[in-house]
Image (cartoon, grey):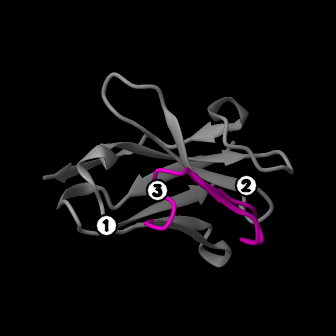
Amino acid sequence: QVQLVESGGGLVQAGGSLRLSCAASGRTIRSYAMGWFRQAPGKEREFVAANRWSGGSTYYADSVKGRFTISRDNAKNTVYLQMNSLKPEDTAVYYCAVRLGATMSMAVRDYDFWGKGTQITVSS
């Protein structure tokens, strides 16, 4: 079992920045892929960003590429999502997730444990 707790959400104006944190417990996340997803009201959960244990392999959704950065601190068992130049369409509940498999994935179904999410609201 892995427990994930997101923090850092809130209300921000368009063009602003936020940094989300995801603290993991129960297992070390060092060897696993970690992902961030989001879900806006009335929409399906969608991929945002993911990276592998080494941080060398990193993927981003086209909609956030160049604005968001995923990183991790394996010593703290924590993953981060730095979000810059936020837009109203970034408004959603953001979730972190861990994939126990060895390969990267952008599919919701491939992730094994999820946090409860944190709300991001971007005002125009």
User: Closer to the camera: disc 2 or disc 1?
Assistant: 1
Q: Return the disc, 2 or 1, that comes first in the chain's sequence.
A: 2
Q: Which residues are magenta?
A: 49-67
Q: Residue at x 30, y 60 (%)?
A: 86
Q: Residues within 10 Å of mark 1 (few under 14, many from 20)?
A: some
Label at residue 85:
1
Q: Amino acid at mark 1?
A: Ser
**Regarding mark 2 in the picture, which secondary structure is present there?**
strand
Q: Is residue 37 left or right of residue 19?
A: right
Q: Amino acid at mark 3?
A: Val
Whether residue 26 can be seen here: no
Label at residue 64:
3
| Residue in the foreground of this view, choosing between 124 and 4 | 124
| Residue in the foreground of this view, choosing between 85 and 100 | 85
Q: Amino acid at mark 2?
A: Ala
Does 122 lie within the magenta span? no
Give me the C-alpha separation between circle 2 and circle 1: 26 Å
Q: Return the disc, 3 or 1, that comes first in the chain's sequence.
A: 3
**In this view, which residue lies farthest toward the right?**
102
Q: Is residue 104 left or right of residue 46?
A: right
Assign the magenta stretch its main secondary structure: loop
Whether residue 80 can be seen here: yes
Q: Residue at x 33, y 22 (%)?
A: 42
User: Closer to the camera: disc 2 or disc 3?
Assistant: 3
Q: Position of residue 32 (x, y in %)?
A: 76, 56
In the rendered view, tell whether residue 1 sits above or below residue 13: above
**In this view, which residue lies farthest toward the top?**
42
Quickly name the residue at label 2: 33
